[in-house]
Image: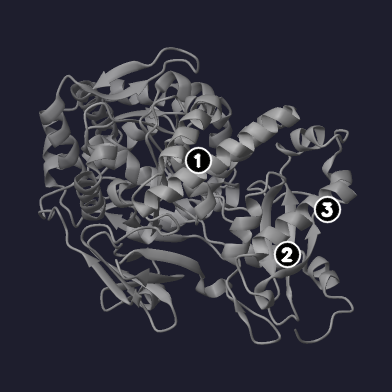
Amino acid sequence: MTVNLATTPALVDVPESTSINTLLADRVARTGDGPLLERRETPQGPWAPVSAKAFDADVVSVARGLVARGVQVGDRIAIMSRTRYEWTLLDYAIWAVGGVPVPVYETSAPDQVQWILEDSACRFAVVETSAHAGVVDAVRKDLPTLEDVLVIDSGALDALRTAGAAVDTQEVADRRAAVVAADLATIIYTSGSTGRPKGAELTHGNFAHVSLNAADVLPEVIDHEGARTLLFLPIAHVFARLIQVATLSANTVLGHAPDVKNLVADLGSFQPTFLLAVPRVFEKVYNSAEQKASASKLKRQIFYWAVRTGIAASRAQDTGSVPAALAFQHRLADKLVLSKLREAMGGHVVHAVSGGAPLGERLGHFFRGVGVTVLEGYGLTETTAPAAVNLPRSVAIGTVGPPLPGTSIKIDDDGEILIKGPHVFRGYRNQPELTAEVLQDGWFRTGDLGTLDSQGRLRITGRKKEIIVTAGGKNVAPALLEDRLRSHPLVSQVVVVGDQRPFIGALVTLDAEMLPGWLATHGLPNLPISEARVHPDVLAALDRAVTRANEAVSRAESIRKFHVLESDFTEANGYLTPSMKVKRPLVIRDFADTIESLYEGAPTAS
């Protein structure tokens, strides 16, 4: 049975006097000399604890420097950096003086940087490297409000600490105390698939509501003694930004991993108890394990047996009982295969939080079979990240769980998901018409499609603007097919097409990292993508993958033809957003001729 409205009452009501500053103050008062973060001085160096008191003192030191530089209450300051301790420090220092940090992805092009800094009227920009400074300098002439660019790797923070030595600490204390829940905390520019990014204005109250309620509803994840997480997603993204605030507000020790190339080693040394990632990360973990197991026929057979056993054990959990024989097989599978995957994630991970796109039931059951419960959630920049999340004690794989405490979710007549709650943003910067379009009677219109089950758990079915209507009048949500096909180790990205066409087709890109291993295990030479994309064995494997993906839909919705492109979609070539979402309209426009070729000679109706 489905319903059209679900509400979860708030567990914590946030007073008007609350801010991100008071959340940190509460943590300092509660844990004092206990560890708040761990950081490294060098990429391979030891993790050194930073106590709550020490971090707070560092925040005040840098904040005094900002005051010395003339930063006023409400001033916007851009941060452009990889995920590292200094970003978190700057965030809290800017908040401490009543400023507004504006995150910028460190991979952003000059025109993107120009738009964000211009639209937000930033006075200062703090960047990680001289190369980043060069990107800002390239558009400096178009940024009349920008006064200076500070470079972290050139000693910018030490310079701020030195400059602030003459500033009375009471100035920072007074400004901190004056910040309240309704005040603007940040402007996050959504990396949309079309047009210029929109600046979503999020308040201190937005962050405080999610942080405090998440700690109460997920204590076994983020609010228990020994909780640790290693942040490797870009802090410029709302998901990582929220986790940063929520973990420092709760009882988690936070670490930063700036380079995902070192992630496995970093996980091994930091040993987190929970992780947050997007589905593509979990797909990569599985595909990498599958590839390593394909070195011999016996290893491959053992791996697939262990995967089937883990998935079966996970599915059995949903029935309330795992049969004794299956439980025995699962313990054996764990000893032979599954435990090694936990070790690759640091050996202590119990939970992982996934957001950004549907994970897929198979991967959800696979990871729970490994011993890592993936808590799939759903949210947007405009909802300060999570609006719904699965709870460890009642995971419903395939859904994104019930509304977060304090949240109402409604399904409109056309299937669109509407959200209401104290974490919904106050509007888009400089765009009152667009704000009025998406905020109606307190409800935020997400543009996503979904359903609610009888328990009030949300299931995402697609994007409203991405619905394909075939020439035969069939409505097709491409996300399900794309997610299933992308789970194949050869596949990097998929764009399903077919609007006003006689059948559904797909554009596919190959995964350059996984391709060599797949070729080797299938007795093929190491081919470049230009040759692999047309090799009969590769095409046959993809055809089988398409057939499996089609099992989830009706024939009218199934992929009939696909084309393998010569290059992948990346952020560098403009086809991916920084949060790894495909810019569908751009792909459809630029590959119009390729799409047309899929339908040459096809009948006019399906």
Residue 184 vertical placement versus 445 (above, below): above
Q: Quadrant of residue 564?
A: bottom right
Pick whichever, 585 or 345, lies toward us.
Answer: 345
Residue 273 vertical placement versus 550 (above, below): above
| Residue 418 pos. (x, y %) | 35, 72
Q: Which amino acid is tagged 1?
A: Gly
Residue wearing tag 3: 539
Q: Which amino acid is tagged 2?
A: Ala
166 vs 412, left or right, is left
Q: CA distance from mark 3 to mark 2?
A: 13 Å
Residue located 52% across and 28% down the image: 263
- The answer, for residue 121, to whether it is visible in the render is no
Check the picture and name the quadrant holding the C terminus: bottom right
Helix, strand or loop under label 1:
helix
Q: Which amino acid is tagged 3?
A: Leu
Q: Nearer the viewer, mark 1 or mark 3?
A: 1
Counting residues from the start of the chain, the first of labels 1 and 3 encountered is: 1
Residue wearing tag 2: 506
Residue wearing tag 1: 310
- The answer, for residue 499, to whether it is visible in the render is yes
| Residue 408 pos. (x, y %) | 26, 68
